[in-house]
Image (tube, rainbow, N blue to C red):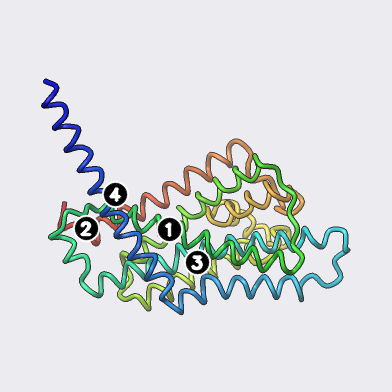
Amino acid sequence: DAGGRLLQDDRLHTGVRAMWLRMTAIFEKTFKEFIRDRSSLFWTIAWPALWVVLDCLIFTQGIPKPILPRIKASMTLQMMGFAIMLAGMANLPASIAGDRERGVYRKLASTPIKAWEDATGRLLALLLFSVVSSLIVLAVGLALGSRFEVTGIRLLKSIGVALLLLLSSGGVGLIIGSTAGSAHSAVSIGVGIAVITSAVSGVFAPYQMLPKGLKIFSKLYPPSTSISAIIYLILGRRYAGYNPLTRLHAIYIVASSLLLHLIGLWLYHLKLWSRRL
C-alpha cells in the first residue's frame, strides 16, 4: 500500500544518506592524511614541479624558438602525469599501510562501513589530491613558458584519459598498500616503482629516444601509454611520438587500466577486509 511504499522509500533514503556519510568520512580522513604527510607532499608535488623547472630551463637549450613553448608543454604534461602516478603509487599505499599499522581496519570491523565504501572514499581523496598536485605542476609549467592550444572536446577526452591514469596508478597503490609492512616502506616502494617505470617508459624523456624494447614497454605499461595519449590529444602525434589512440590501443588502455585497478581492489579486499567476508 501507499504507507508501506512511503516507509520503504524513507528507509532507502536513510540508507543512502548513511552510506554517503561513511564515504565522506573516509574521504576527509584520507585527504587530510595526504596533505599532512610532508614526505608524500615532496614526492608528489615538489619533485615533479622541480623536474618541470629543470626540463624547461636546462633541457630545452638549442631548441628552435617556434616550437619551444610546445616542447615545454610536452614536458609539463609528462610531469603532471608523473605527479598523478606518484599520488596513486605512494600517497595511497602510505595511507593504507599506515591505517593497518594503527589497527584502523580492526576497528572498522565493528562498524557498518563496507570495503567498497572505504575504497571509494580513498579513491575520491586520491582524485582531489591528484587534481591539486597536477594543477600546481601545470602552473609552474605555464610560468616557465609552456603553451597549450586545445579544443574543448580534446580537453574532455584528455581528462577522461587522466582518470584512467589515476585508476591504473591507484591499482598499483592498492597492491602496494595491501602488502607493504609499514607506511614508510609503502612510500619507498611506491616512489621506486613510479620512478623506475617512468624512466624506462618515456615519461622522463621523449618516446623517440627510447630503445626498441622500451618503446614496446612504454606502449604496454598503462600509466605511460595514458600519459602519451594525453600528450597526443593536446599537442599531437609529433610530441607523443606515436598514436596511442588507435581503436585497438584505446581499448587496451581502458581495459588494462580497469584490470589493474580491479586487481588492486581484489587484493585490498582480500588482505585487509577478509574478516568481513
Q: Residues within 10 Å of mark 4 (few under 14, many from 20)?
A: some
Helix, strand or loop at disc 2? loop
User: Identity of the amino acid at label 2?
Assistant: Trp
Kind of residue indicated by mark 3: Leu
Marks 4 and 2, the one that precedes in the sequence: 4
Residue pointed to by mark 3: 86
Question: Disc 3 and disc 2: Cα gap in Å?
Answer: 25 Å
Q: Nearer the viewer, mark 4 or mark 2?
A: 4
Say which quadrant the N terminus sits in: top left
Task: Say which residue appears at 69% left-offset and 74% top-offset.
Answer: 53
Residue 170, numbered circle: 1
Looking at this view, is 173 or 202 the one in front? 173
Q: For mark 3, does the 10 Å Cα neighbourhood hold few (<14), some (14 to 19), or many (20 or more) residues?
A: many
Residue 134, above or below 162: below
Residue depicted at 41% across the width and 56% down the height = 171
Q: Earlier in the sequence, mark 1 or mark 4?
A: 4
Amino acid beneath label 1: Gly
Image coordinates for residue 34, horizontal then vertical, percent: 41, 69
Q: Which residue lies under the disc numbered 4?
A: 20
Q: CA distance from mark 3 to mark 1?
A: 9 Å
Considering only order in the chain, which callout, 2 or 3, is on the residue closer to the N terminus?
Answer: 3
Q: First in sequence: mark 3 or mark 4?
A: 4
Which residue is disc 2 drawn over? Answer: 273
Q: Residue 202: x percent and y percent?
A: 64, 62
For residue 178, side relative to residue 123 (left or right): left
